[in-house]
Amino acid sequence: MKQMIVHCSQHMTRMALLEEGRLVEYAAERAEQQGLVGSYYKGRVMNVLPGMQAAFVDIGQKKNAFLYVDDVLHPHLEKQPRVKPSIDTLLQPGQEIVVQVRKGPRGNKGPRVTTHYTLPGRWMVYMPFAEYVGVSKKIARESERSRLKALGERLRIDEEGLIMRTVSEDEPPEAVEGDLAVLRAQWKEIMRRSLKAEAPALLHRDLSIVQRFIRDAFDPQRDELLIDSQQGAREAEAYLSEIAPEGHKPVERYTGTGPIFAAYGVEEQLERGFSRKITLDGGATLIWDEAEALTVIDVNTAQYTGGASLEETVTRTNLLAAEEIGRLIRLRDTGGIIVIDFIDMELEEHRKMVVAQLESVVSRDRTKTCILGWTRLGLLEMTRKKVRHDALELSTRPCECCGGTGRTTVWNTGQE
């Protein structure tokens, strides 16, 4: 069973997802950024840069959005030209264009946008121009994959594309078809608004952070939802009734005296999970260092001495670390390149065990993750897609003394 704990304030909404009492996902969203990722805008091309194969588009945000050439070409890879054309043959300054936000702004970067449009529903993702049907890789049964593939091909028309989501497994055709009808109507409304709107203009806002997690990671019949806001509880109840008309667990309004995150142990788990040094059961440690596009995780036995031999101790430590790293990557929403320095193991079978353990944990992650394998230096490489705001960035700020390095200088100060 999962518990979804939501804290609402005037400026920010924070959401924690617990599985059997353990924190596995955390997200935060500022009020002014609500629903930015996934939303549609009618924008105006401001600059076209052939040297970067990119354009900057005004969508009405503080910073112009970045549109790369791959996000202008046809969404079906097989229909793209073998040699990419120059972006100035595809877009011109002053041109008006409908775009969808793929990634929110971060630091000095504006949002990233695309013309590969997608509309996620309960059972599927609708793509108006993709021209293919895909099935979630997490659906293992080949018979069910074939059924959903055939169902999607029967339902789609013209250039439409569909991706059948994991939750569509064993769902009746009527439910899937109803979902598609809703998504088609949404797309038609977006196109209707685009004809009337003057750029830059918002055409369609994506769901709030609470609604997105209900749609993507929540079982209305089994999971619990607790919110400390009366308005938030009403909105969540209305959305649940919309996507689960057959019935759902009622939303629980938290009325305790202390903060909701403290009452359910979320704050304590957040403090531990977002630390630079994380101590595992038994005394082993992880050292977690993040740059903008690279994360390095170092595994140390520290005080752990639980094996009959050195190789057994090292392997046990690495297996414990792999399980915790998989959970923390999801919790911290770590994206980009991830390099893990596990403790050196002598036997290849032990290295395979560690990779298998990590794969088992990340398979429960809704975000696309790829484990590439071991480097010649014995490091494990992996990548993970990232689209949301860095939750740590929203909840913290760099230290004024050290500038975010975690260290302060002593030279030229007379200190020793």
Image: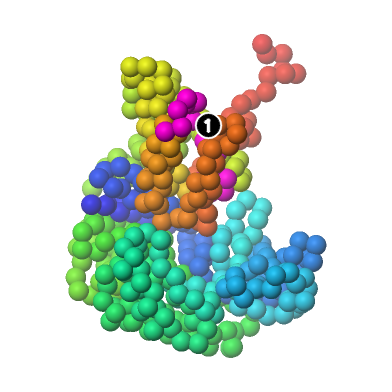
Of 230 and 121, which appears nearest the observer? 121
Magenta part of the chain: 334-349
Going by the image, does 80 lie left or right of 167?
A: right
The picture places residue 202, in percent across and down from the top left corner, at 55, 75
Q: Residue at x 26, y 61 (%)?
A: 219
Q: Position of residue 298 (x, y in %)?
A: 51, 30
State the residue at coordinates (70%, 70%). 82
- In the current view of this chain or complex, which residue is farthest to the front? 348
Which residue appears farthest toward the right when viewing the image?
Answer: 51
Residue 153 appearing in the image: yes
- Name above or below for residue 2 compared with residue 381: below
Q: Residue at x 55, y 31 (%)?
A: 378
In this view, 286 is above or below 274: above
Tell me residue 277's x, y (percent): 47, 29
> In this orientation, does residue 9 appear?
no
Q: Which residue is mark 1?
A: 341
Can you name the residue that lies furthest to the top here? 416
Residue at 36% across / 27% down in the picture? 316
Residue 110 location, x and y as percent? Answer: 64, 60
The amino acid type found where label 1 is placed reads: Asp
User: Does the magenta-highlighted stretch encompass residue 214?
Assistant: no
Q: Quadrant of the C terminus?
A: top right
